[in-house]
Image (cartoon, rainbow, N blue to C red):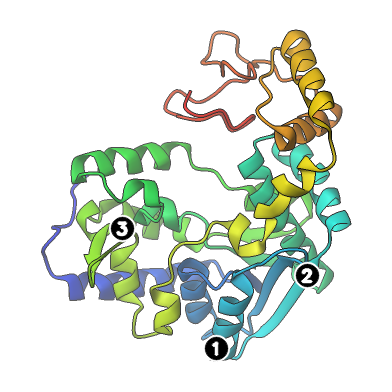
Amino acid sequence: MEKTSSCGDVNGLTLKIRQMLEASVKRNLAEGILLSGGLDTSILAVLASKIVSLRGITVAFQDSVASDVEYAEMVAKELNLEHIIHHFDESELVEAIYTTIRVMGSFDPMEIRNSSAIYIALKVAKYNGVQSIMTGDGCDELFAGYSFLFNLDSNRLEMELQRLWHIMQFSSVELSKFLGMEAKLPYLDPEFKSLAMKIHPGLKVREENGVKWGKWILRKAFEEMLPKEIVWRVKTPIEMGTGTFTLPHLLNRKISDGEFEEKKAKYLKEDKVVIRDKEHLLYYEIYREVVGVPHPVDPKGRVCPQCNSNIPEKATYCRVCGAYPV
């Protein structure tokens, strides 16, 4: 795949990015958007709000600090969007966890913390009459938004990005289908995705004012269209933005140390599943109830050493149990 130059016409490339992403948004219009106030969804909101009357959906755990709310409100006000903010409680979150584990077939704590919040947001959207929803999925993978990529040289960064492109999948798609909704992912539209994959990695991770940023070229492309607080906002994982990062602390109170050790040994012996902590235990027990004991669908394929599920050849972690590295 021929790459753009890392020191070529940046202005020309940013213009092309804007034009092609705007075309992608037009092809993937939706009634609503999961609005986190991060760079990815804010860019889509800017472009889509020029064409349709867009409704922004933001959710936050009421027993925690959720940083997305402040930034999402900023974007909604800037674009004059109808903005629905929903604060969910612990009982709603537990209900969402059950459904998310069943739909996603996973008991990986990071997956469940993030996807449960997405599920709640999708339910809120549907309750408010939104049947199609736009998400920013794929942007971090295409434009190197994850901090673990920032200190890699260009060759290693390109290799890691290609690995991510090969294995990436997003819970918003499956959860939307479950709710009878349609998820729209403009960053993964084939034409825009092709452009993004050809951009030199040196334009994706780059310093600005002495700070190393992921998605640098995308930030430059839209820095005149959004408040600087949004354009240069540090990437915030969903669990931090929505406040579900407090789940481990909440769940630790629900089970004693003795019960944890007893059940950890039981599931290792009976199911050959490694349980890492109390949060992991709770999710596994739900998984065991609604999905079953994990096992390889293809015994000849690559198998996770901690839960016996199949994993893709190029994957470095298990999507079912969250084991890393594998």
Mark drawn on residue 195: 3
Does residue 172 lie above or below 256 as drawn?
below
Please tell me how crowded label 3 is: few (under 14), some (14-19), or many (20+) other residues with Cα within 10 Å: some
Amino acid at circle 3: Leu
Q: How much space separates mark 1 and mark 3, taking CA atoms?
A: 27 Å
Q: Is residue 190 left or right of residue 7?
A: right
- Rate crowding at label 1 as few (under 14), some (14 to 19) or many (20 or more) other CA atoms within 10 Å: some
**The residue under label 1 is which amino acid type?**
Leu
Residue at the spot x=47%, y=37% of the render? 167
* Residue drawn at x 69%, y 24% as measured from the top left: 275
Secondary structure under tag 3 reads helix
Q: Nearer the viewer, mark 1 or mark 2?
A: 2
Q: CA distance from mark 3 to mark 2?
A: 38 Å
- Residue 84 figure quarter: bottom right
Q: Nearer the viewer, residue 191 or 301?
A: 301
Q: Tell which circle, 1 or 3, labels the residue nearer the N-terminal end.
A: 1
Q: Mark on residue 87?
A: 2
Viewer-side label of 3, 2: 2
- Give the side of residue 185 with respect to residue 183, left or right: left
Task: Give the SS element for disc 1.
Answer: helix
Mark 2 burial class by Cα count in 10 Å: few <14, some 14-19, many 20+: some
Of badges 1 and 3, nearer the viewer stands 1
Residue 216: percent from the left, percent from the top?
A: 30, 65
Q: Amino acid at mark 2?
A: His
Residue 111 position, x and y percent, is: 63, 43
> What is the tally of numbered marks visible in this picture?
3
Q: Which residue is mark 1?
A: 79
Residue 71 in the image: above or below residue 113:
below
